Image (cartoon, rainbow, N blue to C red):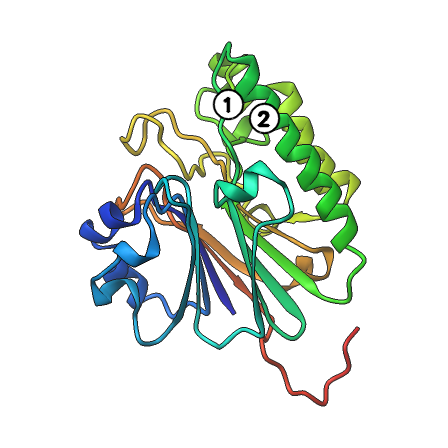
Amino acid sequence: MRVISFCADGIKQAADRGFYEWMADQEADIICIQDIRTEEYKLRDDRYFPSDFNAYFFDNPEGTNGVAVYCRDLPKAIMTGLGFNEFDMEARYMQADFERISFGSLLAPPAILGDEKSMARKTQFFQQLHDHLAKIRHKRREFVICGNFQIAHQARDVQDSAQHGNTVGFTDVERGWMDQMLMDLGYVDAFRAAISDDDEFSWWPDGTMGENGWRVDYQIVSQGLRKSVEYAGILKSRSFSSHGPVTVDYDYEINPDENLPIY
């Protein structure tokens, strides 16, 4: 299966830059989009609802944030929110459930340097996310959580990392949250399971690829998918937003033969 995660900076802008034409050629099974910045009813053009996919959106009346999931096969269920109170009202997470696997599209809240309130909100979000991931890791299904986590995990995930030691998104506390997910809870950074290069970035805050790159867009997967990762890549030849789409191929069937056992 092929899964793509993309933070759009506004889905209308990304569409105008050719995202949906590119998407049509990718042979993806699941496409998770974050930061759509609009409400679904305002998406009048057919390009937002390609015939090869079942499209699902989670938005809010303010037209901020928002996430979407495109599924080639029909999911068994769609879940919006994680029970995180105010964060669910901001439309930051939705999930498509299949028989043995679930796909989430997540947009973490940002924080601002020197703004204690925004950092406290981000801390609260990741504490709740940690508790959620701890609970679901015992379920008899696999999980792929795609999204913009607003955090660069390691020094190799930030261009000129020595200059960003106190920068929000790369503080020791925030990197520690990623450690907890990937080490304490046993989840896997699917991109790093395939690619170990130091110069792989998915976000350019200045809007110019090649300058001040960060890797903040992830596919975090359950332990059972670790050995199924076959390929990973970040699109850099085209620009649909300040983020590049992250593609991961897995040796896994979303809808396997119903006679196969569930482990």
x and y percentages locating residue 33 in the rendered image: 41, 52
- Residue 145 is left or right of residue 60, and the answer is right
Rendered image: mark on residue 71: none
Name of the residue lying farthest toward the bottom: 259
**Residue occupying image coordinates x 49% and y 77%:** 74
Is disc 1 placed on a helix, strand or loop? loop
Is disc 2 placed on a helix, strand or loop? helix
Examine the rendered structure and indicate whether residue 50 appears above or below residue 184.
below
Rendered image: mark on residue 121: 2
Query: Which quadrant of the rendered structure holds the C terminus?
Result: bottom right
Residue at numbered disc 1: 111
Q: Quadrant of residue 196?
A: top right
Mark earlier in primary sequence (2, 1): 1
x and y percentages locating residue 166 in the rendered image: 54, 12
Q: Quadrant of residue 4?
A: bottom left
Instruction: State if disc 1 and disc 2 touch (CB < 8 Å).
Output: yes
Name of the residue lying farthest toward the front: 61
Q: Pick the residue in front: 31 or 48.
A: 48
**Residue occupying image coordinates x 63% and y 41%:** 84
Examine the rendered structure and indicate whether residue 242 appears above or below residue 36.
above
x and y percentages locating residue 148 in the rendered image: 48, 41
Q: CA distance from mark 2 to mark 1?
A: 8 Å
Q: What amino acid is at disc 1?
A: Ala
Q: What amino acid is at disc 2?
A: Arg
Q: Is residue 18 visible?
A: yes
Mark 2 or 1, closer to the camera = 2
Q: Pick the residue in front: 216 or 108.
A: 108
